[in-house]
Amino acid sequence: MCGIIGFVGKEQAAPILLDGLRRLEYRGYDSAGIAVCGEDGLRVKKARGRLQVLSDLTHAGADLPGVLGIGHTRWATHGEPNDVNAHPHVSQSGKIAVVHNGIIENYAELKGQLIAKGYTFRSETDTEVVAQLLDYYYADCQDFFEAMTRVLNAVEGAYALGIVCADYPDRMIAARKDAPLLLGYSENGSFIASDVTALIRHTRDIAYMDDGEMAVLSAGGIRVYDRLMRPVEKEHHHIDWDVDAAEKGGYDHFMLKEILEQPEAIRKATAARIQEGRVVLSDLAMTEEEIRSIGKIYIIACGSSYHVGMVGKYNLERMLRRTVEVCLASEFRYSDPIVGEGDLVIVISQSGETLDTMAALREAKKRGARILSIVNVVGSSIARESDDVLYTWAGPEIAVATTKAYSTQMAVLNLVGLYFGDIMGTVSYETYTAMVRDMQQLPEKMEKVLKDTEAIHALAKECADKEDVFFIGRNLDYALSLEGSLKLKEISYIHSEAYASGELKHGTISLIEDGTLVIALSTYEPLFDKAMSNVVEVQARGAKVLALTTEKHAADLAQRVPMVLSVPEVQQMLLPQLGVLPLQLLAYYIALERGCDIDKPRNLAKSVTVE
Ligand code: M6R
């Protein structure tokens, strides 16, 4: 999704902006631009394509002197990706430049009104209306800040805005509603950014803007105002992320680095939460009484986070004996959901900024449900609007395809199941102790699976020419197949479907023909024999099968199918924690063989902050 960086301070802005944009590249973009206010007024450079084009165009920023500037990476929503539609957008007077994340919903109406007043629009974007409207109000009242408040009252929709005006070469304006924006404080100056990764080279002292707030930034500091223009004291947060964690550290791709970081991420997510054999969730505010009185449980999320919810449904129902409904946030929000007081809504999100997930959270909250979120990005919008937050502590995840966030979300959800199950008295002593023991051993078992990347690479070479791949499985293997299939399609562009094996006969099996690749997940012991029947069925129709199973069955399966991957034995509810690793690596190596842009797959963005 689009990225924003802005700086005003004691150094030349352009190189800082380009560096910040480079760190935001992982969010996905199709064009980039910067605007700098210098002695000779406002100068804007924009270019379609990779950031390098913009950097070359400005000689790494050297061509744009000035200590105040804004930058943007755009992921097209309104209007095709081209130089004109790229941000910043400049007003008709040439004085005002705007970068924007989000969507101005009433832009067409406002644009019509401005055209009637003589304004000419250059781009097809909704954002340009902000620049032109500000220009119009500024010309009318001659007070830039007054004009800005009028604009914020007029526009509807979601926005994170960074704005500069040639008449104020030492000031930047920022505003936020329903799109993330944070403020950075340093001795060298003041920053805005759409996420922390853009700033950690310059400052670790940040504050999150809240909806309805406007900020005025200068080299000496930042003043923040609420909707009624009353000053607001912002709480500062210290970011302790390792700079290296946001860098590739010698790996060819962030995705590979993040796959291999998973054992350590799981250690971080679980170690402090398991003390003397017991799960301790001291970061939860819920009382034992409140936990015991939970009625129905909903898990709401999008994409891979939703797939974690699918695993969670099987495991939480087993541990809590409560109905767990897993909902796609984009469906839940418009479904007039039957949710209310006494219900627990577990919201899962890596970024904490996914718009549909946020909207679903608000819908559930409005109806009286209690919200517990599982989030990676500290201080993100979803975290802040939840009643309880459990952070996954996975560190920055840069590759668009999630890996370590998925794994840590699953681990935290399992901890929730154990903690609640213990309090509710619904999880047996044997299950509890086996789960706790195996969760503590997970990192080592994960390391073991991740050691043999070359074997998986070799299999990937055999599969890389396929154009259709089916993932099948039952129960937890089905939940896992959804994620395996998504990983493969999003980075390798191979068409892939995930099916509950029992559903094959109800239609899909007609697609199986000679050579069709079927990835048969067969880790779930209670249904192993059933999984084998499905393998036989698809093989009889010509499928080439790659089976994923546990070490116990590996040798036997090697006699039955041409390709086998295996994971160590573990408590059955934890099998997806191990099973996902070979599937992530398989997708990675297939994408590598096909020469795909692994960290930034086409058409995708890391954080989906539009509907
Ligand atoms: O940040 P979130 O967890 O809310 O993001 C949800 C999905 O957009 C995300 O999981 C997406 O499906 C991933 N790119 C999949 O790898």
Image: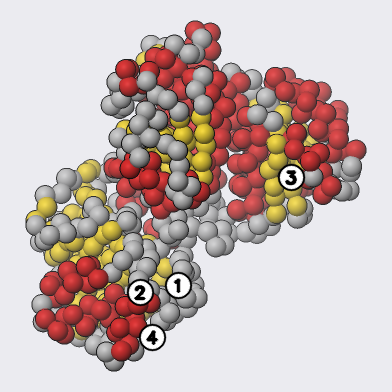
Secondary structure of the residue carrying tag 2 is helix
The residue carrying mark 4 is 122
- The x and y percentages for residue 101 are 35, 64
CB atoms at circles 1 and 2 under 8 Å apart?
Answer: yes
Looking at the image, is 339 positioned above or below residue 37?
Answer: above
Q: Earlier in the sequence, mark 3 or mark 4?
A: 4
The label nearer to you, 2 versus 3, is: 2
Q: Earlier in the sequence, mark 1 or mark 3?
A: 1
Q: Earlier in the sequence, mark 2 or mark 4?
A: 2
Quote the CA–CA distance across marks 4 and 1. Answer: 13 Å
The label nearer to you, 1 versus 2, is: 2
Secondary structure of the residue carrying tag 3 is strand
Q: Name the residue at 75% across, 55% down.
A: 467
Q: Name the residue at 70% across, 19% down.
A: 526
Quote the CA–CA distance across marks 1 and 2. Answer: 10 Å
Q: Amino acid at mark 4?
A: Arg
Residue furthest out toward the bottom:
118
Looking at the image, is 141 positioned above or below residue 21?
Answer: below
- The x and y percentages for residue 50 are 48, 69
The answer to which quarter of the image holds residue 170 is bottom left
